[in-house]
Amino acid sequence: MSQVTTHVLDAALGSPARGVRVVLSRGDGTQVAAGVTDGAGRIGDLGPDRLDAGTYRLSFDTGEYFAGTGRATFYPAVSIDFTVADVGQHYHVPLLLSPYSYSTYRGN
């Protein structure tokens, strides 16, 4: 299983956000992996089974997602920086999204 997973929920609709493009990159900008959220709004296989300790970024193409639903958004992209401190742990990074706000937290 991938060491990093994500889950995107469209809080305005109360449903998973299907079809959101996501890129995982290292702190220096090097792309590690990319994927698209499934019907449940999840990407369970984003990236390798093991990452080195360090800073990473998840970039979500929210503009494309909202355009596909016929809605405007203030945030055409969302980037979440996080630190992999323990290479033995799993990192789940959810995104709760609406056209004019978003939030995130460390999930499990």
Image: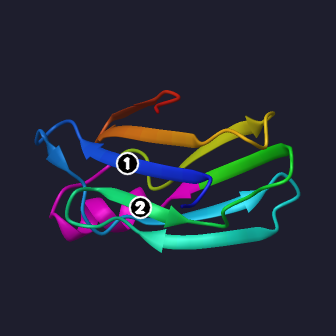
Q: Check if mark 2's residue and mark 1's residue have beta carbons within 8 Å.
A: yes
- Amino acid under disc 2: Ile
Q: Residue at x 59, y 65 (%)?
A: 23
Q: Position of residue 45 (x, y in %)?
A: 49, 66
Element under disc 1: strand
- Image x and y of residue 83, in percent: 76, 36
Relative placement, left or right, of 107 versus 3 is left
Amino acid on which disc 1 is placed: His
Residue 36 against residue 61 in the figure, above or below: below
Q: Mark 2: few, some, or many residues within 10 Å (few <14, many ≥20)?
A: many
**Stretch of the chain drawn in magenta:** 59-73
Q: Any mark on residue 7, and which?
A: 1
Nearest the viewer among 87 and 103 is 87
Q: Looking at the rendering, in which quadrant would you find the N terminus?
A: bottom right
Looking at the picture, how far across and down is residue 99, in whole percent? Answer: 28, 43
Q: Position of residue 62 (x, y in %)?
A: 39, 57
Side of 40 where 5 appears, left or right: right
Does residue 5 appear to the left or right of 42 in the view shown?
right
Residue visible at 67% across and 67% down in the picture: 48
Residue 39's place in the image compared with 103, above or below, is: below
Whole-angstrom CA distance, mark 2 to mark 1, is 6 Å
Looking at the rendering, which quadrant does residue 71 occupy? bottom left
Residue closer to the observer: 10 or 85: 85
Residue 31 in the image: above or below residue 16: below
Residue 38 shown in magenta: no
Judging by the rendered image, the residue that carries numbered circle 2 is 43
